[in-house]
Amino acid sequence: MDFTIKCGNPEKQRSACLVVGLFESRRLSAAAKTIDSASKKYLTNILKRGDIDGKIGQSLLLHNIPGIASSRVLLVGCGKEKGLSASHYRKIVTNSINKLKTTGATEAVSYLSELNVKSRDEYWKIRQFVEISHSALYQFNQLKSKNKKSKNKLRKLVLMVPERKDFATGEQAIKDGTAIAKGVSLARDLANLPANICTPSYLADQAKKLGRTQKSIKVTVLDEAAMKKLGMGSLLSVSQGSHQPAKLISMEYKGGKKGEKPVVLVGKGVTFDTGGISIKPSAAMDEMKYDMCGAASVFGTITAISEMGLPINVVGVVPTVENMPGGEATRPGDIYTSMSGQTIEVLNTDAEGRLILCDALTYSERFDPTAVIDIATLTGACVVALGKHASGLLSNHDPLAKEILDAGESTGDRAWQLPLWDEYQSQIDSPFADMANIGGREAGTITAACFLSRFTKKFHWAHIDIAGTAWLTGKKKGATGRPVPMLVQYLIDRCN
């Protein structure tokens, strides 16, 4: 998809489709009013028939309007004109792209980017437009024997701005939005791949490929022998039942000053999670290929910031394994020693994500980080608590948590902070080891974070549980690419 910035009168735009807004009670947007005037009240007469009244989610496609250079005009419902919110703007843009996909138009000119959105500037509106458009047009067809090429006919979008002085801002927004969209698409592609293709070794190869194409990224991959030498008994306990060897991937993006402390992003990379000996029910087990969405989001974020050339140092650390039952698989009750020296009683082998993350968190100390953020599809309890709309957030440093929350609000990729009080820590006490890997049914998301917190004493840390937000189920099943937008915005904000 190509995006360009332009300004000018709507009636003069030669295009396959012109997109303008309509507010509730059939109030025309500024661009729609201009079209109505040039067409001698054509829109007003159409609206009197009651086919559309301007509610969000509505649209009406019109052809061959007199006095208009464009062959089509798409009226898009924008809801109430006063106080248009960021979330409503996203819905409006999504609706417009979904409708454009059905028109057969290969290119379009949209005036929706000129809508007044409460507390948002031109840069935000255009960048969001680009990101949303790419997301709406995303398809995963690469493993189909037929129709491998995208069926989308829409190839070009012209986004309108009020004045020429907005061109530079708009072009920067397109550049940044395209980079973020590329990162989101990569995260979705990796997550949507089946586990027989996307193995730990495959992820390691993808990291190496990224390192070859981006000179600003240094990639290191540790095999099981190297991890054993480092004492990563917790991580290796998860992979020992599988024929697929574990890998520990680090991707060092060096965009900031030499010697500047990096932000470390740690992504859970369980390429398939059967639950191990504590095996999962068979229903929807195919979706456990998505248990590496945390890893995918790290890949996507590193890709996006390298495309943008952000002046910051960031390290992506991806512990990646396959969790399978087998003759050598971990049994409930087994005890392992982590890289930190702390011992763990594994009461449930399906609580494996924290077992690989804890060693990766300890490994992150070597980068002398200014902050560490782990991203993981960690607990079903988070899905119960927050559903698919918000990721769970827990942290040992409230200023870091606020920065992440603010980034989520800005991008619409939101999180909600849960408590990490000492009172919860006793739930993971063990009579036989330093800790157990589960804490019972109550507060499952919190006790999982309590477990991780015992390996983060030496740095500011935040944990993002994306179990509910990383993928959708049902007819629209597929990875979302979250929380790449949130993470990139957090890093942009740190640069600023």
Image (cartoon, helix red, strand yellow):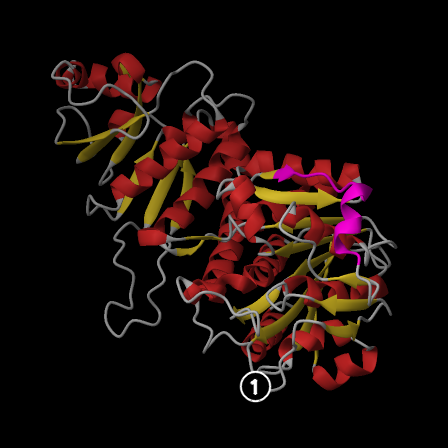
Residue drawn at point x = 80 percent, y = 50 percent: 426
Q: Residue 283: in sight, yes or no?
A: yes
The magenta stretch spans residue 2: no
Give coordinates of residue 17: x percent, y percent.
Answer: 24, 37
The magenta stretch spans residue 422: yes
The residue lying toward the viewer, choosing from 134 and 481, is 481
- Kindly indicate the quadrant of the structure image that contains residue 25: top left
Give coordinates of residue 2: x percent, y percent.
Answer: 39, 50
Helix, strand or loop status at disc 1: loop
Residue drawn at point x = 43 percent, y = 13 percent: 82
Give coordinates of residue 198: x percent, y percent.
Answer: 49, 74
The residue lying toward the viewer, choosing from 380 and 256, is 380
Residues packed near mark 1 inside 10 Å, few (<14), some (14 to 19) or many (20 plus): few
Is 308 placed above or below 252 here? above
State how many labels appear.
1
Q: Name the residue under label 1.
A: 243
- Kindly indicate the quadrant of the structure image that contains residue 404: top right
Where, quadrant-wise, is the C terminus in this rendering?
A: top right
Residue drawn at point x = 67 percent, y = 51 percent: 310
The residue lying toward the viewer, choosing from 209 and 273, is 273
Residue drawn at point x = 81 percent, y = 59 percent: 455
Apparent side of residue 465 relative to residue 88 in the rendered image (left or right): right
Give coordinates of residue 167: x percent, y percent.
Answer: 50, 34
> Furthest residue to the front?
431
Is 333 placed above or below 373 here? below
Q: Residue 216: in sight, yes or no?
A: no
Q: What residue type is labelled 1?
A: His
- Range of the magenta residues? 416-429
